[in-house]
Image: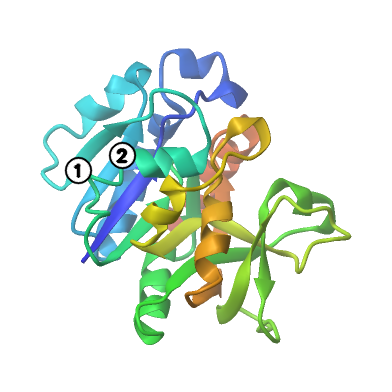
Amino acid sequence: MMNAIIPAAGLGTRFLPATRAVPKEMLPIGARPALDIIVDEARAAGAEKTVIVISRAKELIRRYFEDAPDVAFAYQEEQRGLGHAVLQAAEAAGGGEPGRTLVLLGDALVAGCNASSLLAETSAANGGASAVLLEHVPRERISRYGIAAPRGAVPPGPGPLRIDGIVEKPSPEEAPSDLAVAGRYLLDNAIFGFLATQAPGLKGEIQLTDAIRRMAAGRPLYGYVSPGRRLDIGNPDGYFEALCAFREAAAKGE
C-alpha cells in the first residue's frame, strides 16, 4: 500500500500580502492551483489516498478538494516543523499499517519529470526501500537544505544511488556532498514511529530529516538525482520561474 501526505499548513510569509487571501499552495499555475498539480503527481505515482495537512486558516484548500474521494485532510494546529506536520497525518495516511508513504512538499513543484514516480520505481527496484529526490545545489546554498551522504560514487547524471543518511543544513565545509533533498520523499511507514519519538531540534521543531537519519541507521535508504527542476513557489521569484517552466512545457505539449 502506498499513500501520500502533502504538508500545506505553512504561513506563507515569504509571499505576503497575497497569502492573506490565498494559500500559497493554491496560487495558479496556468488554470490550475499548484496543489492540484501536486495531488495529480501523487496519483500518477500510484498513491491510493492523499492526505493534505492544513491549518484552520486554510479551509479554502479543503473546499477545493471536497469532491475528490481520494483526498483527505489533517490539521497542524501549531507550526513545529515538517516532521511534526507529517506526523499529524499518520493516522489518516495509514501509518500504522505496513506500506510506504509519499511526502510531497506543498510549495514545491518539479518540472520535467514525475518525481514521485521515479521514487516509486527506485523503491520497487530495491526491495521497497525508502527513497528521496535529490538535486545538486551551489556551494553557497548548501546550508539551506538537508544534504545527502552518498555511499560510494555519485552518478554523473540523473539516477539512483545508495545514501547513508541526510544532514540537516550543514555548513559547506561539513557537508557530505552537494546533493540536497528536493521536496519529495518515499518513506517506509516505520518513519511514523521515528517521528513520534523524535526530539525537537532548533526552534523546538521536529525535523523530518532527523527522523530519516535515525531510520536509515537500520534500514536501506536511496536517493534519486533528479532529471527535473525543483521550483519553490513559496516566494515571488520561484513562483514566476514555475509559471515560465510550465508555460514552456505546455507549448511543447508535455
Q: CA distance from mark 2 to mark 1?
A: 7 Å
Q: Residue at x 34, y 38 (%)?
A: 88
Disc ID at residue 246: none
Q: Residue at x 43, y 70 (%)?
A: 130
Spot the residue most to the right. Answer: 173
Q: Position of residue 27 (x, y in %)?
A: 42, 30
Q: Residue at x 28, y 21 (%)?
A: 59
Q: Is residue 82 above or below residue 124?
A: above
Q: Using a 10 Å C-alpha cutoff, classify the residue at mark 1 as few (fewer than 14 neighbours), some (14 to 19) or many (20 or more).
A: some
Residues at marks 2 and 1 touching, judged by CB atoms closer than 8 Å = yes
Q: Secondary structure at mark 1?
A: strand
Disc ID at residue 71: 1
Instruction: For residue 135, say whether it is visible.
Output: yes
Residue 54 versus residue 76: which sits nearer the camera?
A: 76
Quarter of the N terminus within the rendering: bottom left
Quarter of the C terminus within the rendering: bottom left
Q: Using a 10 Å C-alpha cutoff, classify the residue at mark 2 as few (fewer than 14 neighbours), some (14 to 19) or many (20 or more).
A: many
Q: Position of residue 197 (x, y in %)?
A: 46, 48
Residue type, mark 2 in image? Ile
Say how many tags the image has. Answer: 2
Q: Position of residue 204 (x, y in %)?
A: 60, 31
Residue type, mark 1 in image? Val
Instruction: For residue 30, say whether it is visible.
Output: no
Disc ID at residue 52: 2
Q: Specify which label sits upstream in the sequence, 2 or 1.
A: 2
Q: Secondary structure at mark 2?
A: strand
Q: Position of residue 209 (x, y in %)?
A: 57, 54
